[in-house]
Structures are given as structure tokens and as C-alpha cells.
Image (tube, rainbow, N blue to C red):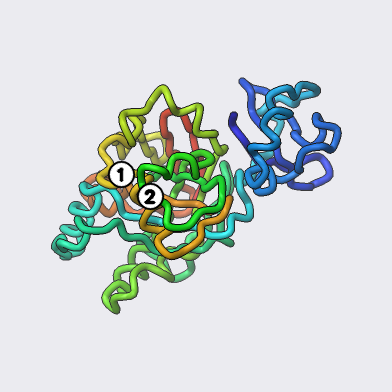
């Protein structure tokens, strides 16, 4: 199932699902029996599933729907750096050699869960930013509460997956990283997810062990710049969840980002491939099985 959040004719955010080119309002077609928001749907998904599987009714063409971020109110967003190629490439560009600790533990930072953007939303370049970058990522959404989750058990805690664009103000980021607290102001202005959250069962045909064989691409103004595959990730989502939940309870709706796929950002590619993003640029991320996430810089 592909879950979305959309704006209805009254201007309200509603939960829906996409089937082909049709959108169904979950609350409406269930006659009010199911939630009108995606977070509550995730929280009670196991009990709601029998009703969801039987739903049918009036639909609206997808191209007539105004999509917003599929999960507008996640409790948190953690973003890892789990692709070795990205870690090595980015480190070379900024003069940071790899550290042995990266190979010992998957590391993450908390980003701004209140600054999410959705498909086709505009992303404002921060006023003091001259080095704006995209980051081609995938994210999982936690489906049920858990603490001290082992990697081999993590699958049962995952609800589904989505595309994540971890927008980066590289100038701000490079300065604050020298202090040693990790990225903060260079990352807090926007994160894009979408166009929908795909329930985990839909990706089973792509599975290779604890990873997925999913092509990942990024384009700017119609020109493909980045190309990778999720199967090349160093740390699996299971390992990330184990790390994140160590001594900490994870809750339904929390988002965990994979970090950028190798060569999945302008920092890695370098100015010889493409300049930094500017207002008017259109950025499109695509992950096999998860759709296309498009945004315009303003």
C-alpha cells in the first residue's frame, strides 16, 4: 500500500492511499471508521489492516490531488551516514580522512522533524546559504514501539519506506562541523520526504538478505547527476535501528534516514560536474519502488 497525505477541497490534510492513478480518502471510504491522518493509521495499522484490505469506494485522479509530505508530524527524524562511498567521497572533498569509529558503529544526527516538505513543495534556500545541496536517500518509518531492538528483529518494527532528500547548506555545515557537534544549522531548514510511504510488503521482491536492490537517481533540471543502488549500503536498516534503540524507546512514526548513497550529492560530484543549487532549480529524486520526489528551489 502507498500511503499519502493530501489537501482536500476544504483545505484539510487527509490520509489516503494510491492505487494506480487513483487516490482514496481513507477516512471517507471507511465511513469514518479509520483515521484521517497517517500517523494514527501507522499506530493502529495491525488492527486496521483487515478493514483497509476491504476498502473500496469513490476515488479521485492522482493528478487532481495536492499532495503534501506523507507524514506531516513524525515524532522525530534521525539521519544516519550508512553508505561507505559517500563517507569517503565527502571526506575527501572537505579534507576529513575516514575514522575507524565509522566502521565500528552506525552514527546519526537528529534533524528538524518540524521542517518537512513534500512532493512538489518549494524549498527555500536559507538567506546566508550559497552552497545548497541535495542528498539522495531512503528512509524507513517505525511501525511499533520498541527498545533495545536487535538488528535481526528490526524488520518487525518497520512500517514502510520513503524517499528522503536531506537538504544541506554546505557553507553553514562546514563551519559548524569544525566545532565537533555534527550538522545542525546547515540541516535544519528543510527535509523532503515522499511522494508516499510504501508499506514494507511492497519491497519484498527487491530484497537481497537484509538489503534491497533498488536503483536510486537524482536529477537537476532534467539532467541526471547521481546514480546508485541501495544494496551497496554498508549498514542495514536493522543495524541502524539497533543503534538508535539502544537504551531508547522508538515510537510509531519515527523516521530513520539511510544517509546519502555514494555520489548522491553535489558535494561528492564536485563543481566540475555541477554548480551548487540556485533558486529556480528543479530537483528530482527517484528510488525504484518508492516513486519520484520533486522539489523546486526558491
Looking at the rendered image, the quarter that the N terminus falls into is: top right
Residue with the mark numbered 2? 150
Callout 1: SS? loop
Q: Residues within 10 Å of mark 2 (few under 14, many from 20)?
A: some
Q: Are marks 1 and 2 in contact (CB under 8 Å)?
A: no
User: Residue at image x 64%, y 37%?
Assistant: 46
Would you say 32 lies left or right of 161 here?
right
Judge from the rendering whether residue 69 lies leftward or rightward of residue 261; answer left or right. Answer: right
Q: Residue furthest bottom?
A: 179
Q: Which mark is first along the chain, 2 or 1?
A: 2
Image quadrant assignment for residue 137:
top left
SS of the residue under disc 2: loop
Front tag of 1 and 2: 2
Residue 134 visible in this rendered orientation of the protein: no
Pointer 1 local density, CA inside 10 Å: few below 14, some 14–19, many at least 20: many
| Residue 261 image label | 1
Q: Is residue 231 above or below residue 108?
A: above
Give coordinates of residue 24: x percent, y percent: 73, 29
Amino acid at each position: 500500500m502507498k500511503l499519502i497525505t493530501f489537501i482536500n477541497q476544504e483545505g484539510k490534510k487527509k490520509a489516503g492511499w494510491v492505487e494506480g492513478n487513483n487516490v482514496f480518502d481513507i477516512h471517507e471510504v471507511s465511513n469514518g471508521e479509520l483515521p484521517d491522518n497517517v500517523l494514527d493509521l501507522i499506530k493502529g495499522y495491525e488492527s486496521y489492516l483487515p478493514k483497509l484490505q476491504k476498502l473500496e469506494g469513490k476515488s479521485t485522479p492522482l493528478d487532481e490531488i495536492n499532495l503534501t509530505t506523507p507524514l506531516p508530524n513524525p515524532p522525530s527524524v534521525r539521519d544516519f551516514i550508512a553508505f561507505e562511498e559517500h563517507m569517503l567521497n565527502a571526506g575527501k572533498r572537505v579534507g576529513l580522512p575516514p575514522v575507524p569509529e565509522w566502521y565500528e558503529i552506525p552514527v546519526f544526527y537528529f534533524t528538524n522533524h518540524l521542517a518537512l516538505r513534500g512532493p512538489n513543495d518549494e524549498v527555500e534556500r536559507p538567506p546566508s546559504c550559497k552552497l545548497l545541496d541535495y542528498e539522495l536517500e531512503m528512509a524507513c518509518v517505525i511501525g511499533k514501539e520498541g527498545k533495545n531492538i536487535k538488528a535481526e528483529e528490526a524488520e518487525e518494527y518497520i512500517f514502510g519506506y520513503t524517499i528522503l532528500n536531506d537538504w544541506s547548506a554546505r557553507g553553514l555545515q562546514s563551519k559548524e562541523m569544525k566545532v565537533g557537534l555534527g550538522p545542525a544549522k546547515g540541516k535544519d531548514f528543510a527535509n523532503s520526504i515522499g511522494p508516499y510511504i510504501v508499506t514494507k510488503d511492497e519491497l519484498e521482491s527487491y530484497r537481497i538478505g537484509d538489503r534491497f536492490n533498488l536503483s536510486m537517481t537524482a536529477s537537476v533540471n532534467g539532467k541526471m547527476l547521481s546514480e546508485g543502488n541501495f544494496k551497496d549500503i554498508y549498514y542495514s536498516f536493522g543495524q541502524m535501528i539497533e543503534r538508535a534503540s539502544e537504551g531508547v524507546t522508538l515510537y510509531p512514526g519515527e523516521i530513520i534516514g539511510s544517509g546519502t548513497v555514494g555520489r548522491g550529492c553535489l558535494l561528492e560530484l564536485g563543481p566540475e560536474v555541477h554548480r551548487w543549487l540556485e533558486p529556480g532549480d528543479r530537483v528530482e529524486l527517484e528510488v525504484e519502488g518508492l516513486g519520484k520526489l520533486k522539489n523546486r528551489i526558491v
